Image: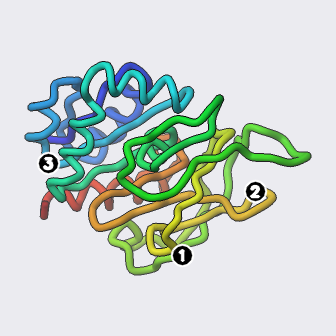
Amino acid sequence: MIAIIDYGMGNLHSVSKAVERLGYETVVTADPQTILSADGAILPGVGAFGDAMQNLRETGLDETAKQFAATGKPMLGICLGMQLLFAESDEYGTHEGLGLLPGKVIRFEGDYKIPHMGWNKLDFVQGKSPLFNGVTGGHVYFVHSFHAKPELVGDLLATTEYYQQVTAIVGRERLFGMQFHPEKSGELGMQLLGNFLALTKTA
């Protein structure tokens, strides 16, 4: 069972359907015990970092997410969900994140189109990650105005280029984040999501 964490901000339906297409049972839930008993968890998200963290704290799901990550079972943050894994964000003020990965989320700054929206090529930094089993590369779909800056180089698994190097995938042990939307990224996105889900069978 894959728990999709429902804290009121996320494209839950499309993520759930993508997981089901890959042959896994899902539950969209805000119940801590259901989440903690799942084989894997996905933290999706769209919207503002501060609002998301407020919702997580008000429901107690911030602690649930931290507890789940501490179990060592596979956990994936998608888009805003990936950004929430980090220590803080400067989106409309300074906001504390889940602190599961050291680093900060900052706004794109420059004379170019913001948000970053569209298909961009992935560049794999850490080739040995289990997320990349059988993956040869390609393009995935991004929509975001803020991007993560991991403190530790070992947490950076893949990047893309958008007027600078942009964090695309992060990971440590069985905790992962994807800035893009794998469920909207065609065959490559589904491959990456499938590789994450496969880890739940050996959790």
**Three-letter code for the amino acid on which mark 3 is drawn:** Asp
Using the rendered image of the protein, determine whether residue 114 is visible from the camera's viewpoint.
yes
- Residue at left offset 41%, top offset 47%: 85
Q: Position of residue 120 (x, y in %)?
A: 68, 56
**Three-letter code for the amino acid on which mark 2 is drawn:** Tyr
Furthest residue to the right? 111
Measure how far apart labels 3 and 2 are at the Cα level. Answer: 35 Å
Measure how far apart labels 1 and 3 are at the Cα level. Answer: 27 Å
Mark 2 — residue? 162
Mark 1 — residue? 125
- Residue at left offset 38%, top offset 21%: 55
Q: What element carries label 1?
A: loop
Left or right for 62, reference 38: right
The label number, if any, that marks residue 39 in the structure image: 3
Residue 59 in the image: above or below residue 84: above
Measure how far apart labels 2 and 1 are at the Cα level. Answer: 16 Å
**Three-letter code for the amino acid on which mark 1 is drawn:** Val
Q: How many C-alpha atoms fall within 10 Å of the one at disc 2: few (<14), some, or many (≥20)?
A: some
Query: Which mark sits nearer the N-terminus, 2 or 1?
Result: 1
**Which of these two is toward me, 17 or 112?**
112
The label number, if any, that marks residue 136 in the structure image: none
Q: Position of residue 138 (x, y in %)?
A: 59, 64
Q: Is mark 3 on a helix, strand or loop?
A: loop
